[in-house]
Image (cartoon, rainbow, N blue to C red):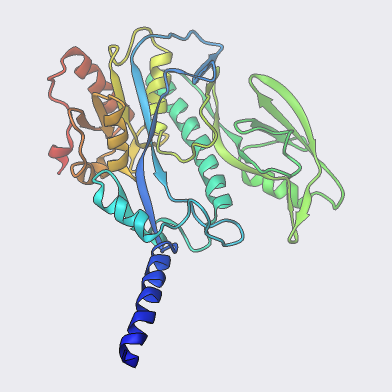
């Protein structure tokens, strides 16, 4: 046996082992897959998702489904990329051949310094902001009056505010001064003497509470562990009892429609199933989101008959497979509401379409 043949016989299996091992190494790509949908008119863990206190509410049939996307996670707080993070070659090949899945470069989805912790925090803040905007838009559609306020968007674990403040608490006063903007909270915390405390007056579920917090110094900065946000002081309480693991602002449109439906008699959907997505702005306009093809696929699999698409997502939505589901362009909550009502009255009605936008 020649030396060359012997070397080839030894090297061949080693190359195969190296190739097989390389196929399981994490690559700088992430996958998008259809996620689950949630009927926000239904119950979760025995409680209504849309909860109203202090105003007449109505529970009728029909479904309004928010949609989700399953996305590969970012790196953890130590910069490691473990299970559920970057995908290997086999994961990417499987997603590539599935029409409902998508593959993107890692840095096209996540910033360089983005981690699972920061991603969860930003998603939680966006969810609270989205719910506040959704309530405001629904109430404005009904002609109800309310005022702007500063509220709690996020409470960090292990910090002084944990257990004392909750997301959506309305911040009324700090050290006896009326709060009109979020910056006042930051300024008050920084001006608190070392070892001292500050006093907050808050409103939670129509109840006034006094809270005392002692700031903690972290990396030279005094913190109490909250993210204040621009919220609203509503005439009665509306809560969206959604899984806290669901973050982001993309369910805003569906929340707003569900709140409107809950505050009005009769079924908005005529007993049918409507799904959709879109970030809702305080003025009612619907903004673009990510993963529209995967959300359309998830809604299709869960039996939705109508799907509401943000206008800036229309081009991408036309490349998805909706099955028998109608795609409706939703520029505002008001327009989406009208489209659903027209569709309930006549399933063949001429509705705003993504084809028209394209």
Q: How many marks?
A: 0
Quadrant of the rendered structure where residue 346 is?
Answer: top left
Quadrant of the rendered structure where residue 285 is?
Answer: top left
- Quarter in which the N terminus is drawn: bottom left
Toward the viewer: 289 or 47?
Answer: 47
Toward the viewer: 141 or 88?
Answer: 88
Q: Which residue is at 66% across, 24% downward?
A: 204
Is residue 259 in sight in this rendering? yes
Position of residue 36 measured from the top left corner of the image (x, y, whole percent): 39, 33
Toward the viewer: 339 or 305?
Answer: 305
Tell whether 70 sits left or right of 47.
left
Tell me if residue 69 comes above or below residue 142 in the rendering: below
Position of residue 294 measured from the top left corner of the image (x, y, whole percent): 31, 41
Q: Which residue is at 52% across, 49% downward?
A: 119
Is residue 235 in sight in this rendering? no
Tell me if residue 283 comes above or below residue 290 in the rendering: above
- Quarter in which the C terminus is drawn: top left
Most extreme residue toward the bottom is 3
Position of residue 191 measured from the top left corner of the image (x, y, whole percent): 77, 51
Q: Which residue is at 42% across, 61% downward?
A: 24
Tell me if residue 28 comes above or below residue 144 in the rendering: below
Q: Which residue is at 33% across, 11% downward?
A: 267
Most extreme residue toward the front is 1
Position of residue 212 measured from the top left corner of the image (x, y, whole percent): 80, 36
Tell me if residue 313 comes above or below residue 103 in the rendering: above
Tell whether 45 sits left or right of 340.
right
């Amino acid at each position: 046996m020649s030396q060359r043949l012997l070397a080839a016989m030894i090297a061949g299996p080693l190359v195969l082992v190296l190739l097989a091992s390389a196929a399981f190494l994490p690559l700088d790509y992430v996958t998008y897959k259809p996620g689950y949908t949630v009927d926000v008119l239904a119950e979760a863990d025995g409680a209504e998702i849309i909860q109203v206190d202090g105003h007449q509410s109505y529970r009728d049939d029909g479904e309004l489904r928010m949609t989700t996307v399953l996305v590969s996670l970012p790196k953890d707080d130590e910069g490691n990329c473990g299970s559920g993070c970057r995908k290997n070659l086999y994961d990417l090949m499987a997603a590539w051949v599935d029409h409902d899945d998508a593959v993107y470069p890692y840095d096209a989805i996540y910033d360089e310094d983005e981690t699972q912790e920061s991603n969860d925090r930003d998603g939680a803040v966006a969810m609270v902001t989205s719910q506040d905007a959704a309530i405001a838009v629904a109430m404005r559609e009904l002609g109800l009056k309310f005022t702007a306020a500063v509220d709690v968007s996020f409470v960090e674990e292990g910090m002084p505010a944990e257990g004392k403040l909750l997301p959506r608490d309305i911040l009324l006063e700090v050290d006896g001064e009326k709060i009109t903007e979020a910056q006042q909270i930051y300024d008050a915390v920084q001006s608190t003497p070392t070892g001292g405390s500050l006093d907050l007056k808050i409103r939670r579920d129509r109840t006034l509470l006094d809270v005392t917090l002692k700031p903690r110094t972290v990396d030279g900065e005094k913190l109490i562990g909250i993210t204040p946000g621009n919220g609203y002081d509503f005439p009665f309480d509306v809560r969206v009892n959604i899984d806290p693991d669901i973050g982001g602002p993309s369910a805003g449109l569906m929340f707003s429609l569900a709140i409107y439906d809950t505050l009005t008699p009769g079924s908005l959907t005529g007993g049918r199933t409507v799904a959709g997505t879109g970030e809702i702005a305080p003025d009612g306009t619907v903004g673009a989101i990510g993963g529209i093809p995967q959300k359309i696929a998830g809604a299709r699999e869960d039996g939705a008959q109508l799907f509401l698409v943000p206008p800036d997502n229309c081009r991408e939505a036309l490349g998805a497979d909706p099955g028998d589901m109608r795609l409706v362009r939703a520029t505002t909550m008001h327009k989406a509401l009208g489209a659903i009502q027209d569709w309930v009255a006549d399933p063949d009605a001429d509705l705003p379409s993504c084809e028209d936008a394209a």
